[in-house]
Each structure stands twice: as C-alpha cells, then as structure tokens.
Amino acid sequence: MAGEEQRARHVAIIMDGNGRWAKRKGLPRAMGHRRGVEAVRELVRNVEPLGLECLTLYAFSSENWKRPEEEVDDLMNLMRKFIKSDLPEFVANNVKLKIIGDWQSLAPDIVAMLEDALDQTKDGKHTLAVALNYGSQQEIARAAAKAAAIGEVNEKTIAAHLDTVDLPPLDLLIRTSGEVRLSNFLLWQCAYAEMAFVDTLWPDFTIEHLKAAMNDFAERERRFGGR
Ligand code: IPE
Ligand code: IPE
Ligand code: MG
C-alpha cells in the first residue's frame, strides 16, 4: 500500500531457540544462553535508528521454572552478569528499563539489582521492557483482581492494571526459532498486534532480521475489526 506505510512503535520478541542453537553446534545448552545474551546486547546497541518507542523482550517465563535446576540457575546467573555489565551502557544510551512479570519474587539480590537498574535508567528515552518471571495469564488475573477491588471489571479497567499499562500499544510480535505459539506471552496485548514467526534461532537474530520484520510490518494493512 504505497504512501500508507506505518511505522511500528512497539515491537515484542519471544527470544526462542538458544537450546537448539547450541545442540546444532554440539555445544552445551548454557553456551546457547550465553550467545543469546550477546544477541540481546547487540540488538539493544543497534536498535535506536529504527525509531521504536519500546522494544519488549521475553527473557524468562513463569513456566521456565519447570526446567532443570541447573539451567534455571544458569539463566539467573546470566541475568545477574548482564545487568552488571550492561547497565552503564543503558544509562549512556538513554535506554529506559522496564520490567514486566512477577520479577519481585525473583532472588532478593536480583530484585535489588533490578530496582537499582530501574532507578538509574528512569530518565531514559527509549524503553526496553524485559519480561522476567512473566506469564500473561497470571498478569491478566492480577489485573482483573485489581479491577474487581475497585468494583469495576471491564476491558478498560483490566488494561489499566496490566504490567504494560505505560507502554505504547503492541504493534508487532516476533517469535524466533520456527515455533508458532505465544507461550503465555502478552496474550491480552496481542489482540490486534501483527505477528511474525521467523525460523532464525535467537542467538543468530540480528538487527537486520528486526529491520526486515519491521519493513514487512510497514506494508501490512491493519483493520482492527473495521473496514
Ligand atoms: C529461549 O531458548 C531461552 C529461554 C526460554 C530462557 P530455549 O532455551 O527455549 O531454546 P530451545 O527452544 O530449547 O531451542
Ligand atoms: C518462551 O519460550 C519463553 C521465552 C522465550 C523466555 P519457551 O521455549 O519456554 O516456550 P515453549 O516451552 O517452547 O512453549
Ligand atoms: Mg524454547
């Protein structure tokens, strides 16, 4: 639709495929997660020219606790290292960190690191929202309970209590690794989001893949139920 191109304000990514990336290379799973963190770092470094208001990344789901303890510990340690190493860069690059999900029930030292990171980045301009211990059904249930407590349950009062309340509407959801499911991510927010499922495994995902998905989004015709 020439002349009617739209630009995405908010893109969310289900960063999937670290394990398969490692397996294909004959490496331990932990190496896949490590390379996954590097892919996040590179993406965040290069995302500014794309003009997004918000990039949301699914990093750890409420259901990921089901994985072996060793893998969960590894992911938590990677999180600790990442916050420590990359926070100064976030501050320098005007990144405003936002965490969605039940992050306050993570380990106390991680909660403290995240609180500090949120504080240090609060004046940032481009939002990087990270979903940690996030489950969309749980988020909706929490929001519905809060709406019930104020005595008015409808789509507006529920939306007003979601973790994403201060983020722009979701335009585009990308999932890597070829899986075509939402895995309890942003179910409410996806109501009218465009979807992109790409085969690339997360550690191989680059800014060029994101650009391509956003260019494809720009051409799509969104109707929101109208005509
Ligand atoms: C995504 O990669 C990272 C997390 C879920 C934390 P996976 O670990 O799910 O990789 P696959 O899906 O097994 O390849
Ligand atoms: C979704 O990926 C969660 C994250 C990417 C953090 P999973 O690998 O956990 O999803 P399923 O289990 O394949 O649905
Ligand atoms: Mg997976």
Image (tube, rainbow, N blue to C red):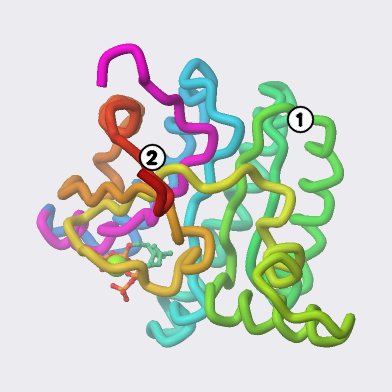
Locate ligand 1 by image quadrant.
bottom left
Residue located at (75% from left, 63% from top): 160
> Residue under circle 2?
39
Q: Secondary structure at mark 1?
A: loop
Q: Residue at x 50, y 16 (%)?
A: 49
Q: Is residue 85 above or below residue 148?
A: above
Which contiguous range is marked in magenta?
1-24
Residue 36 appears in the picture as rendered: no
Q: Residue at x 70, y 72 (%)?
A: 158
State the residue lying farthest toward the front.
227
The kind of residue tagged 2 is: Ala
Q: Which residue is mark 1?
A: 124
Q: Is residue 12 above or below residue 23?
A: above
| Left or right of residue 51, residue 36 in this image | left
For marks 2 and 1, give the one nearer the viewer.
1
Based on the picture, tell me whether residue 4 belongs to the magenta stretch. Answer: yes
